[in-house]
Image (cartoon, rainbow, N blue to C red):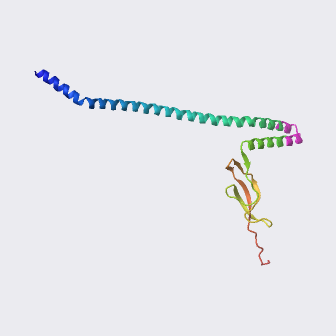
Amino acid sequence: MTEETENKTELENTEETAPEVVELEALRNENEELIDTLQHLQADFDNYRKRAARDQESLVARAGERIVKDLLPILDDLERALEAAEQHEEAKLEDGVKLVHRQLEQLLEKEGLAPVETDGKFDPHVHEALLAQPVEDAEPGSVVEVLQKGYRLGDRVLRPARVVVAGPKEEPSGDPL
């Protein structure tokens, strides 16, 4: 009878703990599923990050390729102008250089490049003052000469215009020497 009593006790213990064991086993299974899902998501995100980086590199390379392709006809015209210079045909050289300049300007305008306006007042956001000099017929703080053109690409200033700004007028001294 002792054996029968032990079996009954084991059966009773198993029945009493069975819901807890089942719940624990369910939680373990759920935990394993969540870990598996998390690992898949982590791998997917890592693959996405790598693919996005490759796509970005490809986009930059294609953008550079496009502008270089557009510059090739200008390079051809410049070579023709240089050939004309070797033959001492100054008129053709000047025409060739003007043509190249015009084509390059048009290409850069098409890409969004625009010159910085230099008429009027000095603007420190788009101008770089190299000199200030008194000028009789100019208002102080106005741009009187452009030493190097400035350019914008869209809203950004690529290079500020280097300018000479009108300074305060010099007052003649009353002391004759």
Residue 176, x across and y down, in percent:
80, 78
Residue in front for this viewpoint, 3 or 135: 3
Q: Is residue 92 magenta?
A: yes
Q: Which image quadrant for residue 147?
A: bottom right
Magenta-drawn stretch contains 64: no
**Magenta residue span:** 82-95
Quadrant of the image occupied by residue 62: top right
User: Which residue is at the far bottom?
Assistant: 175
Name the main secondary structure of what is drawn in magenta: helix
Quadrant for the C terminus, please: bottom right
Q: Is residue 13 left or right of residue 131?
A: left
The picture places residue 136, in percent across and down from the top left corner, at: 80, 67
Quadrant containing the N terminus is top left
Give me the residue at 71% from left, 37% from top: 67
* Residue 141: % across, % down: 72, 63
Q: Position of residue 68 (x, y in %)?
A: 71, 36
State left or right for residue 105 relative to residue 87. left
Vertical arrangement, residue 2 with respect to residue 93, above or below? above
Q: Left or right: where does residue 94 sit relative to residue 164?
A: right
